[in-house]
Each structure stands twice: as C-alpha cells, then as structure tokens.
Amino acid sequence: MYQGPGRSFSVLLQRDLRLLYTSALGLPVKRSGQLKSLSPQAAFPYCHSVCVEIPNTTPVASKAAAATANGPVGSRTVYPMGSSSSRLYSALAQTLSTPTAQAEPCPQGALDVEPCDPDELLKECEEVLRNRPPRLHRTFVLPKNHTYHGRPIRVMQWNILAQALGEGKDSFVQCPLDALNWAERKYLILEEILTYRPDILCLQEVDHYFDTFQPILNSLGYHGTFCPKPWSPCLDVEHNNGPDGCALFFSRDRFELVDSASIRLVAAMLKTNQVAIVQTLRCRETGSPLCVAVTHLKARSGWERLRSAQGSDLLRNLQTATGGCEGVPLLVCGDFNAEPSEDVYRRFSSSSLDLDSAYKQLSADGQTEPPYTTWKIRPTGESCNTLDYIWYSRHALRVEAVLEFPTADQIGPNRLPSYNYPSDHLSLVCDFSLLDKSNRLQ
C-alpha cells in the first residue's frame, strides 16, 4: 500500500487564515463544535488586501494575516505548500506575509506576486508526488475532418472536490483518508492544471481560493474571480477553510476582462444556494469578444425541478450578457449535477443561444455524451454519472480537440478520488477556435 511522506513540514498559516474569507464575509464558522460569526472588522488587524465578488453585493476588501509558527492549529496541524525554497511556498508567502496598515479595495485577481515558471512548478509537483502511483494517462481526441483554425483556446472545466467535503461529509468509503490530505492533494490538483495549461479555467467546490489558488495561479499569469455559496456545506465541517464556491481564471496574456458578474441563481423567484460567474473577455490577439460562465447546480436526486429552474435563470442571464444567438460567442462550464436525461440538460441543448456540448465529440455519432464524468463509491453504493459539461456556441466556436476520459481499468476498482487522482470528478479539457464571422453558420 502507498505510504505518504512524513509530515515534517513547518506550519505556513494559522487557524485564522484558514477562516479568512468566511470571517471577512461575516459568515458563520464552525469551530470546535460551535458556530461563531466574526465581523470583517474583527477578522485581522494587519494583512494583505484581497477581494472577492459576492452575489448581489459590491466587492468586499478583506484581510489576510500571515503566520510562520510551528505547531498544532486547533486540533490538527496545517501544512504548507512545501519548503521555504518551494515555488508554491514562495507564491503564497509573497501574498500573505507583507502586512499593511489597512485593507484597500482592489480588483479581482490583482495580487502583486512574482511570476512563476510553470515548468519549474510542474517539476516541483512531480517531486512532491514521486511516491504516489502514476497519474491517469489521457490523450486528446481530434474530431473528424479536423483542421486547426489559428491558435486554439484551451478550456478546462473541473469540480476539484472541496477539501472540507472530501474529508468531512462525502464519505468516499473506498478512498483512504490519507489520500485526501491537503498537503499533497493540492499538488495533484495543480499538477493536473499545469499539465494541460488552459487559457480559461473553470472550477467548482473551491474552498482554498485565497490561500492557494488565487496567489499561485496569479503568479502563473491568470486573473481570478471567486463566488462563494451563501450557505456552503463546508461550514458544517469542523476546521473548515471557509465556504466553497465557483472560481473562474483566464490567462492575462490571451484575454482582458471587459465585464464581470457574480450571480446567485433564482428558482420560483427565490434566491438559492447555487451561484455562477459570467464574464465577457476580449481576445488580445484578435480583439474578438468571448463570454464565459461557470456554475455548480444543486446536487442530489429529487432536486431535478430546482436544477431546471436554476438553469433557466442562468440562461436568462446569459441571454442578457451575450445579446442572444447573434451576439457574443459563449462558453458555459459547470457541474450541472444532471444527467443528459434531465430537463435542465434539454433546456441548454434547445436554448435559443444555439449551444452544444463539446464532449459529445467523443462519441462515434457526435450526438452522445460520455458514460461518466464522475465515478465514486459511497456507503449507498457506486455512482457512475455524467454531470459535467462544457457548452459552446456552435455557430461561433469550433471544437478542435477533446481530452478523453480514462477507462474503468485505468481508474481502478476503488474509483475516485484516489492516491493518483484528487477529485471524484474528472477534468474536462477542450480546445476551441473562434470562427470568423464570415465562416459562421447562418
């Protein structure tokens, strides 16, 4: 059986940092079995300024305290990204260790961090994970009659599994708890991202945005936006890292931000716990606009009507953001928690926005979704489902390549997550090209 490395790392962050954005938003934090609520003013007296877009509010500036003390945090130890020479550690330390007298408003993703070489960072990930089993081997599949049209836009969609949920609520009975320890699992997640290096990265169940993904991906040249769930289930878990939510990153070399909205999805005129981020980008090379959305709909069976209503609300927002079918080209990434047989899937496939699902390209007829995007074993049994999608404007975008899924034998009998894969959901990665208006379908 695999044995993880010894836990001899020094402590990077204290307990208060792990609760940073929960405190800053005034949300309840479960700590030692009791729910407490902290005001933004009581959060941290000396900090580095960061921002988060919150549904139906203006951006809030919050503070992050840095700590370098060794020892336990609460009832367990928090481990850093690596040694002081680590690229990951350096990216975090720059962001979190410089105190300022007061927090100041800042645009999303505007962190002053030293650029990081992605190749060196990938090597570091591989070094940390050298004792873990080989990762799942996946290759890109090219559609029939494939011809590239310029430099493609690579898009990654991934539910990365919130750390608090993986350890505290999801009950993956075939996954050893040690396989989920954050000290290594974050390297598995970053290795997956660095392996494919998307231009646009859409994530769900992100509960380590401020202390991991924002500073590290910022150092790699990404602009990031985070939208937390108002009542995240992560907050029910002791020693949580704050609420989980959706995050959208894009390469600053390829795109610039034109407009951004964080949306709390509505059903039957009531605000729900599910959210979305909708952004309009402009391609720096061509000047072409592109609208990108990320969402995570309500989970579990029995909630099909709610998911359908949430999908309808998102489609209404997308109609406004793009100007309709003849407007701005659109990409919608998400964990819809819905099989293709559900009404919310039919609403997207028949929308007036002329959307198609990119991963149908893996099927022989180009009309069928893959058999699974998530595969896990819980106390109730084995779940093998297709829940994740990348929707695109078929009249304005062309699918150039699709990353295939591993086989059942490659995944293994214990399914996901595992020692060699960090989430119960597989990442979806597609290459797209923007069609010239003269080549678009009329």
Image (spheres, rainbow, N blue to C red):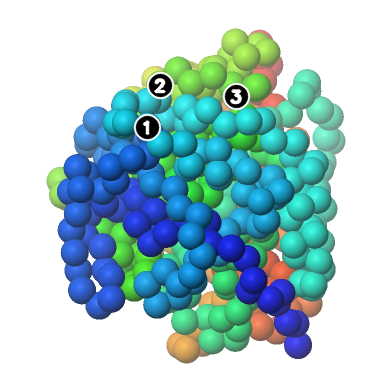
Q: Is 113 placed left or right of 193 in the picture?
A: left
| Disc 2, SS | strand
Q: Nearer the viewer, mark 2 or mark 1?
A: 1
Q: Secondary structure at mark 1?
A: loop
Q: Secondary structure at mark 3?
A: loop
Tell me which residue sits at (45%, 72%) in the image. 72
Q: Give the camera-side residue of 397 and 78.
A: 78
Identify which amino acid the numbered label 3 is placed on. Answer: Arg
Alpha carbon separation for disc pair 3 and 1? 26 Å
Instruction: Determine the residue located farthest toward the left in the rendered image.
Output: 269
Q: Which is in the foreground here, disc 3 or disc 2? A: 3
Across and down, in percent, residue 137 comes to 81, 61
Percent position of residue 415, x then y: 65, 78
Instruction: Say the numbered circle drawn on residue 259.
Output: 2
Q: Which residue is mark 1?
A: 100
Judging by the rendered image, the residue that carries numbered circle 3 is 252
Q: Which residue is drawn at the image coordinates 28% and 76% (left, top)?
A: 32
